[in-house]
Amino acid sequence: MLANVRSCALKGIDGFEVMTEVDIAPGLPTLSVVGLPDAEVKESKDRVSAAIRNSGFDFPMRRITINLSPAELRKSGTQFDLAMAVGILAASGEISANAIEKLKKLVFLGELALDGTLRPCAGILPMLISTKDKYTAVIPPDNLLEGKTSGANFITPRTLRDLINWLEGQISDETVTVSFVPPEEEDTQNLLDFSDVKGQAVAKRALEIAAAGGHNVLMIGLPGTGKSMLAKRFPGILPPLSDEEMLEITKIYSVCNLIGAARRLTRRPFRDPHHTVSDVALIGGGSTPKPGEVSLAHNGVLFLDEFAEFSRTTLEVLRQPLENGKVTISRAKETVTFPARFTLIAAMNPCPCGNLGSLHTPCTCTPMQIRRYQNKISGPLLDRIDLTVHLNPVAYGDWNKPAEGETSAQIRSRVMAARKIQQKRFAGTSTTANAFMTQKQIKKFCSLPDGADRILEAAMRKFGLSARSLDKVLKTARTIADLEGKENIENTHLIEVLQYRPLDRKGVPDL
Amino acid sequence: MSISAQERLARIRINAFLYFRADWLARLIDIFGSAEEILKQDAQTLAREAQMNPSTAAHFLRDAFAINPEEELEKTEKYGGQILVPEDEQYPQALRDSKEPPIALYVLGKLPQNKACIGMVGTRKITAYGRRAANTLATGLAEAGAVIVSGLARGVDSECHAAAVRLHKPTVAVIGTGIGRCYPPENRELGRAILQYDGAIISELPFNKPPNAFHFPRRNRLIAALSEVVVVIEGEVKSGALITAKLALEMGKDVLAVPGPIDSPQSGGPNHLIQDGAGVVTSVKDIINYIPQPQLFNLQAPCEKEQGQMPQEGLTELEQKVLEQIGSGELSADQVVEALNLSVPEVAGALFELEVKGLLTCNAGLYAKNKF
């Protein structure tokens, strides 16, 4: 007997339909899975046979062949368990013809426990999105949140037995649908506020500019000057996520099976991988490519603390996502693209011992060590960082003062006003913020004011500003102008941007 | 007195043996009559006649024949330089009079004639205070017409050379590599500017010799020998700057020191020197007063203006205020914002203008004045 049951698999962060074809023929009892299954798919057969027996059905003692079609695409994940189990039951005649007729309108996603309970699995959201117009889905109850997010029709039976009973029409739709209780929204908005940070006016201003224009920031400062504190508060001044953005990041988190951890993805992600992170963990990859930290930070913030401690190759792989807002991973079999448009907030010490510029503890590094440390951040990478700020220790007097700075909400309202201007400016193009302007757009929107020549000439002479970094000065100046609601860039804007210039690489006195 | 072309080539050869002091090499020349004669000997004869260890003698000959003197000359001349021996007229008298004159001196640019030479040495890890002192003193001295002799290293050396170059005045860099190299590499532009404004870059090392720790104390003796007085600006208690000071004292030259904060490791060296009786420098005049009469030439003692505030014409009120706030300390932009109760863009504007005007330097986010 033959049965066809629909399921789904993932390619990158998009789902595609997979037909699970089950054939049962006379012969020695075996179960083989074909159609490029990965190891976890091959293991399905043991879970499926146990789940079928423990749900009170007979497992056919015959030769079973399962084909996952299209057979040329690699398949991974544990979501095929359910489709295989239903297929075997259908092919062995355990369920009625009526129920089999119903299968045509359904898509089955879910992992099975040995006792027949449905367990959650990764990537449910993109798979639901790919099939939602055509079929009703069967998903595990624990993936309910994703089902709601996708907008698809679905049921959530607790066990394989419940599912079969429902197919047979013995129990109603309601019994196999868990009711949706929206998870409590955690009020983290007010937990981390910019007004907690004392002093550091320059760094706060730089972060405001970064939030307003989507610019990347490098913070250099002694240990304990508040680099991490500022970075953690940065998502709070970003504009709220649009529905489209929310769906994008939820898809990525779904593929990585992180929905539970992130609860509701209505807030911008904040990822802070440790500096020992591997290239693959940061950028994504693996034999079946999975999104890395840069994609998990999509539409949010990637915070790299101890920036200079990351291995050089790890830092270099950041260049593609910083440039294009996506990561392309090529394998012999396939090429997948993950979105990765994030704001990079990097933080580092000024020197290996961490005391350069401290007024209390002398730095014990040699000039060569300092150079080597700072040079770990390559020029091309620095070129993609628009703002660099130096943080100095907060004096005791400041530390003791009650917080009285601006709140995140105040800053956020200015950021949103600036973003609005940008939305209008870039309407109809793929550019979303000033930081992502193309050459053409820079020409069009960043005309220089009178007297700018003198400033830029002085900056080139004094600070070693390269012609190449001129573009980022213009983009950032555009953002400052937007924050002030000005039509054109003014000289004061340019000068302020130069305040956030990168590390002094010259190290020699002016001539 | 001049020497033959062959002898000059031979001198360049024996000069390449860096494990002997220059006066020992001179003694070898004395024993054998000429450098050419030395190179004709085999290792055994050399060892016997000069009472050397035979293996040292073999090493000596190996090093001497390892370099190609014609090529050394050709390369030096290609850069517009020359290789001087003590018999040459242009060879600096100060070196000829020293205890250890280099056997061969590679010179790029013009050596100063009839000018007071002041050695200015100090740490590579310069502090804002050191930068201010180096800048103020070197500018004052160069203005007065003195030639600053230093080592083209990072930190104090670079600041002193750069101060002279900014005034388009000659300065002499005695370097610890061959003249065909630039060390540290970031000083390439500075080296070029020194030559452009009639200064000189000199070294006794073979043309392409890379830097090596033991080259530097050797080059320090040349700085001490070329200078009438040596000014130590900053340096730790055990540092190259103090080696130069010690060598200068041994040569009977005056050593002056710029006093510094007692808790700054970089001022440990100069403070220590002052304890031992070195002259205290608080102004350009203090230095000029120490130069012996015959070497004063036409040095113009500066008028008193450099003692007061630096000229501050053309500053806006805001810039003036920011400058005053920074005073003699090091402040971050944050601290200026806080202290003056201004906005970040306002302070950024003032700091930018002050930096462009050369009144401030920003290092690791801290702003400090360039001059007193």
Image: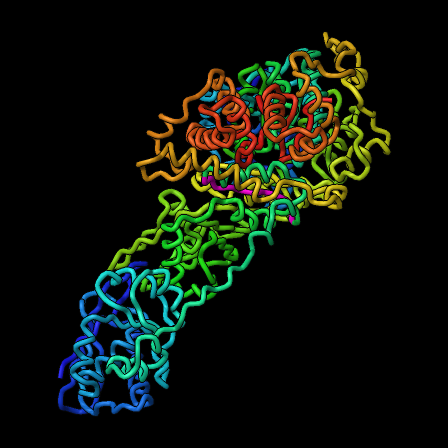
Q: Is residue B263 visible?
A: yes
Counting labels gives 0
Q: Which residues are magenta?
A: A214-223
At a point 20% along the width and 70% down the height, the residue shown is A105
Return the x and y of residue A49 as percentages of the image width and height.
29, 86
| Residue A220 falls inside the magenta stretch | yes
Q: Position of residue B266 (x, y in %)?
A: 74, 37
A141 to A433, vertically: above or below: below
Q: Residue at x 71, y 11 (%)?
A: B144
Q: Residue at x 47, y 44 (%)?
A: A239
Quarter-of-image position of residue A374: top right
Image height of A44 relative to B44, above or below: below
Q: Is residue B27 visible?
A: no
The C terminus of chain A sits in image quarter: top right
Q: Position of residue B312 (x, y in %)?
A: 69, 14
Q: Quadrant of residue A87?
A: bottom left
